[in-house]
Image (cartoon, rainbow, N blue to C red):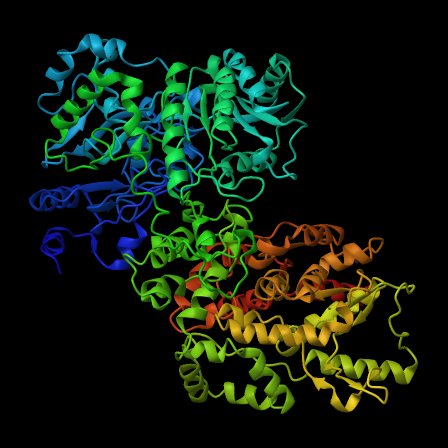
């Protein structure tokens, strides 16, 4: 233990972490930069903050204050001690509806403040796109703004008083009239009033530099306001009194379509006299085709408010009439539809990191701002500058305030690319200044732009900034290298430490050029995975919502993998215990695959890591017991031992011993095996039909009835055959022929001429199809590939090129369907049969919709409750299921989140508490609160098991519900 660490542990009541894993988690924010801290401290209160500063000052170690780590310019990273305020100092301390103020701590997430204010009809005005994870301390440090700044201004406009601790331990309460000013600040300002009155451009989004002009006497000498945007370089915030605004009772959204973003930009300023709440712009490159927007190549999102929906709509229609040169328009009043459109806009900070062709794009010039009336001209010049440097980017952002966000396809991996990045940055800074703008209009200067501030302010004002920094922090202890005396903008880039050659890996990573490092680079740190509540159908990231630990977020795990590849902090490579421990609580729910704006797929990364981590070593017992579950269950089936196994599992001492040996959580009950497997039932059904003459002729291409192959996954086969039986009943009632996959692989033996071949039943290999899911989730990828190849061999007659494409495989278990759609081609990308099978996998609802479009399900007219399976949400989509439920009169939606069992995860020893907490987030409360007669739906075996074991509720697959209704007709 170092003297610094020992000193902090002796002085601080909060957590002090100097281990490699904790340091690795805080090497980066959402910027291009990387700095390795000495340690991380999570203070409990202002006393802890003062103690940290005292110890670090004694050791000459810098301190960086950090909130959600979503800063895009590098100001939330540092080489000394990082203060993580999100762990403890994260509360609303008071809220006064009459005065419209709130007292908050710096680690409070903005959405939590909005939730506290909403019952009083109030809200905090600024709302960055990262509102679900950014903190008030970070917003004050960066002077954040958000979409509603045209109505409610910046964070500085919403701050009344601030409590800070200076680097030398003084506690100050900052406010107007020089309140809380450190010694020497007033003299500095009063000695240079003329420069302060003339040196700052008049902009609604001027964030760059220190806001020393807020200290002018005509502006009230507001020390709190001048502190905003100082990026943690002047003092450490411990408490804030902020102003709230009245939230409109109703809102409408006018979506205006334009030919391109320049046309939209030209039109934005003219809408401001109508006092909209937002004027946001984005172009088609950032919008999914299903977004439901009006025609156009770019759009303005103009929100209006009112006391009633009619008043809000009338104001939106006024905006539409006032807009010029529109291609098409749309007014949206439905709150759910508005939220869906806003999600498109909010996800742009992530989706912009990929160009339309899939290549990478990066921040660095994320939020320049110019006068709104100059925005169209600026964008044209900006586009020309991009073209001159051979770069690409898609602008979007706060058009009403003249603030543009853009990610650019800089090459930050090679020396020539970094040199071009530097040249472009200088030229763009000159362009922004020429248009009367600010280098930063929202996210701060950090390392990305601080070096270029002299081009905006000139050397005299920069010198004044340096003197102000010296007044507040004479020892340069707080976040050095930001704003004044900055580090070069091209130093410390986070990509420099990654390996240049792709590592040998098992998955194909086709979207990342087969490069695991490129896959890990997908995480840009916007931290959507750090949301503390799941909203709507979202899943990501259930383990973080339970623990609140950065290591258990998708971003945290990606950071650890990044540092594993770098080899500086995490030095054991694939053998890293730090990475293993962080991934241990990853449920492999695949939620990040769809919910992460850049498609980070942590379930795949986890499987890859576990494969290498345990190569040549003994695995945890659960990997053998649960990872090889199909193997054990087939053995039980072949020996007809299911009843014996069930009987032994009911003997408590034997069950306890078995769970201990198998690495299964002692809190879990061992699920019973079905006395008759699905395929055995199916075989007997076919025999019975043959005897009675009910059998149908064999499948013929172009036959009168469409046919599907029903996949007997491990869970349906051995644990829930009732689901398979129900599916057969419904599919046949819908007019489909049902087949099952072959169980023999026919070897072709040569005959007399040495060329011709016949199928020889004596040499046929027996086997069962399997998606390999359990092997993948435990990282047994060699075994998974072997199982998958055997499956493809069995299915080869059905996967031939000439086979009719309508012959699809209906997979009832969502996790198995997802494995066949994604993991199979990912692991066997060199086998064309894998792609053919993946393309033919359909869910139960998809099969009915595709092959029996005229069939009407029986009407149940009952409410439903349950949860959409994580893998269905992430990979398969549930739109056909929703339509099928609606047609059957099953009313109500299913919740999001994760059930927490997640295959083997919830059964593994040590995971029960997290597993149960995940279920308690949405699923169990929804089921408990449902009225009598509600149908509990869960298509996944894990979800049904979790409900059974934690709530005593029997949930059913949709196929079972429909089959029962058929029997009742």
The quarter of the image holding the N terminus is bottom left
The quarter of the image holding the C terminus is bottom right
Labels in figure, total? 0
Image spot of residue 5 (x, y percent): 14, 55
Q: Residue at x 22, y 29 (%)?
A: 162
Q: Nearer the viewer, residue 947 or 530?
A: 530
Q: Residue at x 49, y 43 (%)?
A: 360
Left/right placement of residue 771 relative to residue 731 reads left
Image spot of residue 703 (x, y percent): 91, 65
Is residue 374 placed above or below 854 in the rendered structure?
Answer: above
Q: Nearer the viewer, residue 391 or 605?
A: 391
Image spot of residue 671 (x, y percent): 54, 77
Image spot of residue 696 (x, y percent): 89, 74
Residue 277 seen in the figure: no
Q: Quadrant of residue 169?
A: top left
In the rendered image, the residue lying farthest to the left is 58
Q: Nearer the viewer, residue 36 or 718?
A: 36
Left/right placement of residue 42 relative to residue 781 reads left
Q: Residue at x 37, y 47 (%)?
A: 495
Residue 511 seen in the figure: yes
Q: Residue at x 22, y 46 (%)?
A: 79
Is residue 334 placed above or below 47 in the rendered structure?
Answer: above
């Amino acid at each position: 233990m170092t003297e610094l660490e020992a000193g902090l542990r002796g002085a601080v009541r909060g957590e002090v972490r100097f281990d490699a894993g904790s340091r690795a988690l805080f090497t980066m924010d959402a910027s291009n930069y990387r700095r390795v801290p000495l340690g991380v401290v999570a203070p409990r209160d202002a006393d802890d903050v003062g103690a940290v500063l005292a110890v670090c000052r004694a050791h000459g170690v810098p301190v960086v204050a950090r909130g959600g780590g979503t800063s895009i310019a590098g100001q939330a990273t540092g080489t000394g001690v990082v203060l993580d305020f999100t762990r403890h100092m994260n509360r609303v301390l008071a809220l006064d509806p009459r005065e419209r103020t709130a007292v908050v701590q710096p680690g409070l997430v903005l959405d939590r403040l909005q939730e506290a204010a909403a019952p009083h009809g109030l809200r905090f005005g600024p709302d960055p796109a990262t509102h679900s994870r950014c903190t008030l301390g970070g917003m004050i440090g960066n002077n954040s703004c958000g979409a509603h700044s045209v109505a409610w201004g910046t964070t500085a406009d919403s701050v009344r008083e601030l409590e800070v601790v200076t680097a030398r331990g003084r506690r100050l309460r900052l406010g107007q009239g020089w309140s809380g000013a450190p010694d020497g600040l007033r003299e500095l300002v009063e000695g240079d009033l003329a420069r302060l009155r003339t040196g700052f451009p008049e902009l609604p989004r001027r964030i760059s530099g220190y806001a020393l002009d807020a200290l002018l006497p005509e502006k009230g000498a507001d020390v709190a306001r001048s502190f905003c945007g100082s990026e943690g370089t002047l003092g450490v915030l411990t408490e804030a009194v902020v102003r709230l605004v009245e939230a409109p009772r109703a809102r409408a959204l006018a979506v205006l379509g334009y030919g391109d973003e320049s046309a939209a930009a030209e039109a934005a300023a003219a809408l401001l006299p109508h006092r909209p709440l937002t004027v946001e712009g984005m172009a088609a490159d950032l919008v999914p085709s299903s977004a439901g927007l009006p025609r156009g190549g770019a759009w303005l999102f103009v929100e209006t408010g009112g006391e009633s929906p009619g008043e809000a709509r009338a104001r939106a229609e006024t905006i539409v009439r006032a807009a010029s040169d529109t291609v098409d328009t749309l007014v949206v009043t439905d709150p759910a539809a508005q939220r869906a459109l806003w999600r498109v806009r909010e996800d742009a900070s992530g989706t912009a990191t990929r160009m339309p062709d899939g290549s990478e794009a990066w921040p660095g010039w994320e939020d320049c701002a110019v006068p709104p009336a100059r925005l169209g001209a600026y964008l044209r010049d900006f586009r020309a500058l991009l073209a001159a440097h051979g770069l690409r980017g898609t602008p979007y952002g706060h058009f009403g305030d003249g603030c543009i966000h853009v990610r650019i396809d800089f090459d930050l991996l090679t020396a020539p690319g970094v040199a071009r990045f530097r040249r472009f940055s200088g030229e763009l800074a000159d362009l922004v200044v020429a248009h009367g703008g600010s280098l930063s209009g929202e996210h701060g200067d950090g390392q990305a732009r601080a070096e270029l501030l002299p081009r905006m302010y000139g050397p005299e004002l920069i010198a004044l900034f340096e003197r102000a920094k010296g007044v507040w922090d004479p020892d340069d202890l707080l976040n050095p290298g930001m704003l004044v005396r900055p580090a070069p903008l091209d130093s410390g880039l986070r990509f420099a430490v990654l390996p240049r050659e792709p590592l040998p890996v098992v998955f194909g990573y086709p979207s990342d050029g087969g490069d695991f490092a490129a896959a890990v680079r997908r995480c840009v740190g916007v931290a959507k995975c750090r949301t503390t509540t799941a909203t709507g159908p979202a899943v990501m990231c259930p383990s973080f919502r339970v623990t609140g630990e950065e290591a258990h977020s998708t971003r945290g795990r990606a950071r650890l993998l990044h540092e594993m590849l770098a080899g500086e902090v995490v030095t054991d490579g694939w053998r890293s215990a730090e990475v293993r421990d962080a991934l241990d609580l990853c449920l492999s729910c695949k939620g990040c695959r769809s919910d992460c704006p850049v498609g980070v797929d942590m379930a795949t990364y986890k499987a890859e890591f576990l494969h290498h981590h345990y190569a040549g070593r003994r695995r945890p017992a659960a990997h053998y017991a649960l990872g090889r579950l199909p193997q054990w269950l087939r053995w039980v089936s072949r020996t007809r031992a299911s009843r014996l196994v069930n009987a032994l599992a009911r003997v408590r001492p034997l069950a306890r011993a078995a769970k201990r040996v198998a690495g299964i959580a002692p809190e879990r009950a061992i699920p019973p095996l079905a006395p008759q497997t699905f395929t055995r039932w199916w075989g007997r059904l076919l025999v019975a039909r043959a005897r009675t003459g009910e059998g149908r002729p064999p499948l013929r291409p172009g036959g009168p009835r469409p046919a599907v192959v029903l996949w007997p996954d491990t869970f349906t086969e051995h644990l829930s055959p009732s689901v398979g039986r129900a599916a057969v009943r419904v599919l046949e009632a819908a007019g489909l022929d049902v087949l099952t996959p072959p169980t023999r692989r026919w070897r072709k033996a040569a005959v007399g001429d040495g060329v011709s071949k016949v199928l020889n039943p004596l040499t046929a290999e027996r086997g069962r199809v399997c998606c390999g899911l359990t092997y993948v989730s435990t990282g047994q990828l060699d075994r998974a590939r072997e199982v998958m190849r055997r499956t493809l061999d069995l299915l080869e007659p059905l996967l031939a090129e000439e086979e009719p494409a309508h012959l699809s495989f209906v997979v009832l278990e969502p996790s198995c369907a997802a494995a066949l759609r994604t993991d199979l081609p990912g692991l066997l990308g060199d086998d064309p049969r894998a792609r053919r099978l993946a393309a033919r996998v359909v869910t139960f609802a998809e099969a009915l919709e595709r092959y029996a479009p005229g069939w009407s399900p029986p009407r149940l007219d009952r409410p439903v409750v349950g949860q959409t399976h994580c893998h269905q949400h992430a990979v398969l989509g549930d739109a056909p299921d929703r339509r099928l439920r609606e047609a059957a009169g099953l009313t109500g939606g299913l919740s999001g989140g994760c059930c927490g069992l997640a295959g083997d995860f919830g059964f593994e020893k040590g995971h029960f508490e997290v597993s149960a907490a995940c279920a308690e987030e949405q699923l169990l409360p929804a089921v408990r609160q449902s009225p009598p007669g509600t149908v509990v739906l869960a298509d996944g075996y894990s979800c049904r098991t979790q409900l059974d074991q934690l709530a005593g509720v029997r949930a059913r697959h949709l196929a079972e519900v429909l089959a029962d209704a058929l029997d009742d007709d």
